[in-house]
Each structure stands twice: as structure tokens, then as C-alpha cells.
Amino acid sequence: MAYSATRNKIGRAMDPIFEKSLIAHTAEFSIGQLLDRKSRAGLAYTFQDLRGFQSSPYRFVRTSDGVAMAEVHPRTRRRHALTAFVLRSLPEAWLDARSHRSIVMSPYPA
């Protein structure tokens, strides 16, 4: 079982007057079963309650007469998710993988 609450302040670059908030409460309940030494299966239910500004502060919609308006989303939203999962650990041979990365930087213009 898990619970989280967040309070977000939403702003818009170059617009000091624009300030909105979004409060989110999330709860998750899950149950799992070991299938063998390397496998696990389970179910999880997630509930989320969102209240406040949920639109993008940068997304605008232009109407047919040329007027630009901010997009509008509901101020209250509830989400439910049911998830079934099966997890299996990786073979030990896969954990001994090696990698190499080369980075080539292009020179900056003078």
C-alpha cells in the first residue's frame, strides 16, 4: 500500500502574473505472489484525485475567426488503473555486460 500527495505551482516563462496550482492525491494497493525463486506476479490498483489547473500553460487553441484561447481541461479529475504484472529476474550472464561509449564534440563556431 502506498500514498502520496503533491502540491504543484504552475507558472509560465516570461509571464510573472500567471500562477496556478494543482493538488494530486495518489493511492496504490497491490498484492503479489512469488511463482518461483526468480518470478513474481501480482495485481495493483491505483487511484488518483487531481484538483486544480491541469491544462498546459503553453498550449493555445486558435478558433476559426483567428482568436487564440488557452486550452481548457476539467479542474477535477479522478483516475483509476488496474495493472497485472509478471516480473522475472535477468539471467546472471546478462548482468556481466560491458559497454563503451565514445563522444565526439564538434567545435563551436568562432
Image (cartoon, rainbow, N blue to C red):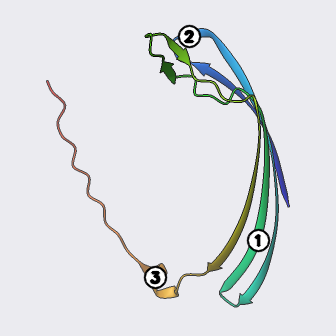
Q: Quadrant of the N terminus?
A: bottom right
Q: State which quadrant residue 109 falls in.
A: top left
Q: In the rendered image, which quarter is residue 100 located in?
A: bottom left
Residue 43 badge: 1
Q: Position of residue 65 (x, y in %)?
A: 45, 10
Q: Which of the two marks, 2 or 1, is nearer to us in this view?
A: 1
Of helix, strand and loop, which one carries label 3? helix
**Residue at 51% in and 20% down:** 60
The picture places residue 101, in percent across and down from the top left corner, at 30, 61
- How crowded pointer 3 is (Cα within 10 Å; few <14, some 14-19, many 20+) is rated as few
Q: Amino acid at mark 3?
A: Trp
Residue at the front extreme of this rendering: 64
Residue furthest left as drawn: 110
Foreground label between 2 and 3: 2
Residue at the extreme bottom of the image, as rendered: 36
Task: Using residue 11 as the reference point, say whether residue 77 is left or right of it.
Answer: right
